[in-house]
Image: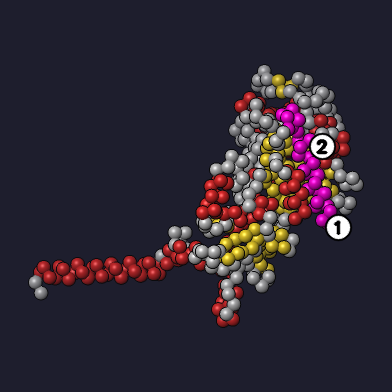
């Protein structure tokens, strides 16, 4: 063979070898990656070839599946009372993907999870079609309904937790949306999606988990806890050394109060009438670093709070000066919290200082309803001692019985709460946020529910009439009554 032919043969041989290597690489090394890529339409067709498992609330499914007309995707997701439950479920759309529980538990719901391998294998021999498993939530239908109806047309959110376990009982965000409206891939689905995505009301945002607000005076319970835990205050009815007027440390700025009677007011009285000066003074005495320490034990500055849907981190600034810390101690300045976070604060206080990790999936089941994973309640931290928690409880009960939270009273039930009206915007010119946090106590001394309500905007309400006690407290009361009623 002459030299040119040998070169050509060698070159062709190298091309064949490269082709063999590439083919084997694709078939054996990259096979799984390619088969699961979102761009692979076969994956999507397979995903919607069978009915999804369901998301369950108190034994009843709040989701379903329906045959899709004129599409190679056989089934699409349906929702019962979709707007009520979308902050929990998220959405599963043929065209726009999935979020929240629909996304996080997709393997179980589609039946593709490795833990369902045995069920799939048995189905191959019995001829049964592939089925998805179910996601059983901790949600309380009556509490969810009460929160949703009471919020009505207002922009806002509610989070309710069982303090004893951390189980989430209600998670509401308004205005809401119906995930069924864009679950398919038709023109009408696309239109509904675009309208929602571009909505000024931010309907797709889960305000309960993924929106932070200045918590206003509801944060004063955290400052009270810090003052007790760090020895700044011992007896809640002793007078403090708070002057009137109170000047923010290092400045000439006077911090105003909404009520008279705050000069040297006790911790108990200051919480009852919500004295800014007392809590700013206490926050300064606790010091920034110790305020940060207490806030973080309650869950602030933690960006890994998974319910399993991840909540945005609530913030207590670690680097601010003394004046900023004093303002933050009353829930202003850079302090920001999700409704879930403030429900966690309330739950820890109601549970005698023990904060349980929040969760909303009780268990995962196979198609035959066998439990394949069960959530066990977990302690998250101890922000304050049992004795100090009971002192804060006493003060919060006083707020409801004789203070700014009277609209949360429930006949025959011990209720503790705290109002908040949080200023925001440049020069505090925007309409304030109305907050209320509360808990209800059983006859045996345990608390079955802790609630946080924020109302971002209320149509037709004058700025001067916006208050946590007036707007948010009735919502919290309805949720607590729903939980207490469902216990009977």
Identify the element where label 2 is drawn.
loop
State whether residue 145 appears in this view. Answer: yes
Q: Which residue is mark 2?
A: 405
- Residue 404 higher or lower than 427, as above or below: below
The image shows residue 138 at horizontal and vertical percentages of 72, 57
Q: Which residue is mark 1?
A: 488
Identify the element where label 1 is drawn.
loop
Of the 4 image quadrants, the one containing the N terminus is bottom left
- Residue 189 higher or lower than 52, as above or below: above
Secondary structure, magenta segment, majority class: helix
**Residue placed farthest to the left in the image?**
2
The image shows residue 395 at horizontal and vertical percentages of 83, 37
The image shows residue 459 at horizontal and vertical percentages of 70, 35
The image shows residue 392 at horizontal and vertical percentages of 81, 40
Q: Which of the pair 306/67 is nearer the observer?
A: 67
Q: Which of the pair 73/254 is nearer the observer?
A: 73
State the image quarter where residue 368 is shown: bottom right
* Residue 483 located left or right of residue 198: right
Q: Residue at x 86, y 57 (%)?
A: 488
**Residue placed farthest to the top in the image?**
252
**Residue 389 inside the magenta-drawn segment:** no
Q: Earlier in the sequence, mark 1 or mark 2?
A: 2
Residue 157, labelled with which disc? Answer: none
Magenta-highlighted residues: 461-488
């Amino acid at each position: 063979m002459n030299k040119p032919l040998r070169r050509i043969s060698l070159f062709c041989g190298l091309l064949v070898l490269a082709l063999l290597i590439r083919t084997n690489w694709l078939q054996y090394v990259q096979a799984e990656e390619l088969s699961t890529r979102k761009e692979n339409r076969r994956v999507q067709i397979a995903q919607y070839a069978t009915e999804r498992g369901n998301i369950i609330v108190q034994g009843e499914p709040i989701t379903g599946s329906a045959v899709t007309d004129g599409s190679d995707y056989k089934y699409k997701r349906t929702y019962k009372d979709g707007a009520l439950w979308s902050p929990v479920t998220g959405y599963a759309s043929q065209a726009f993907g999935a979020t929240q529980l629909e996304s996080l538990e997709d393997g179980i719901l589609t039946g593709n999870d490795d833990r369902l391998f045995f069920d799939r294998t048995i189905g191959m021999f019995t001829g049964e079609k592939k089925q998805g498993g179910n996601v059983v939530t901790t949600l309380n239908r009556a509490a969810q309904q009460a929160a949703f109806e009471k919020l009505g047309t207002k922009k806002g959110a509610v989070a309710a937790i069982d303090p004893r376990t951390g189980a989430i009982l209600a998670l509401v965000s308004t205005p809401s949306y119906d995930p069924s409206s864009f679950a398919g891939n038709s023109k009408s689905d696309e239109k509904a999606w675009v309208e929602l995505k571009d909505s000024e009301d931010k309907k797709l945002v889960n305000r309960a988990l993924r929106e932070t607000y200045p918590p206003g005076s509801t944060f004063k319970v955290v400052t009270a806890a810090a003052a007790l835990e760090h020895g700044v205050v011992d007896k809640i009815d002793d007078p403090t050394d708070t002057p009137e007027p109170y000047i923010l440390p290092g400045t000439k700025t006077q911090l105003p109060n909404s009520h008279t009677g705050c000069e040297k007011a006790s911790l108990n009285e200051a919480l009852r009438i919500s004295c800014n000066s007392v809590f700013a003074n206490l926050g300064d005495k606790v010091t920034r670093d110790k305020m940060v320490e207490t806030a973080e034990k309650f869950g602030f500055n933690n960006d890994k709070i998974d319910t399993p849907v991840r909540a945005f981190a609530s913030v207590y600034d670690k680097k601010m000066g003394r004046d900023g810390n004093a303002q933050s101690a009353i829930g202003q300045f850079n302090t920001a919290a999700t409704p879930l976070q403030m429900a966690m604060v309330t739950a820890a206080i109601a549970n005698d200082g023990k904060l349980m990790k929040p969760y909303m999936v009780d268990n995962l089941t196979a198609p035959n309803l066998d439990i394949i994973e069960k959530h066990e309640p977990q302690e998250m931290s101890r922000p304050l001692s049992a004795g100090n928690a009971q002192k804060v409880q006493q003060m919060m009960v006083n707020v409801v019985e004789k203070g700014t939270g009277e609209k949360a009273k429930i006949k025959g039930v011990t209720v503790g709460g705290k109002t908040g009206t949080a200023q925001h915007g440049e020069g505090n010119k925007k309409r304030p946020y109305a907050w209320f946090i509360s808990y209800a106590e059983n006859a045996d001394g345990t608390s079955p529910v802790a609630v946080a309500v924020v109302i971002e905007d209320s149509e037709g309400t004058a700025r001067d009439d916006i208050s946590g006690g007036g707007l948010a407290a009735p919502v919290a009361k309805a949720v607590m009554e729903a939980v207490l009623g469902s216990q009977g």
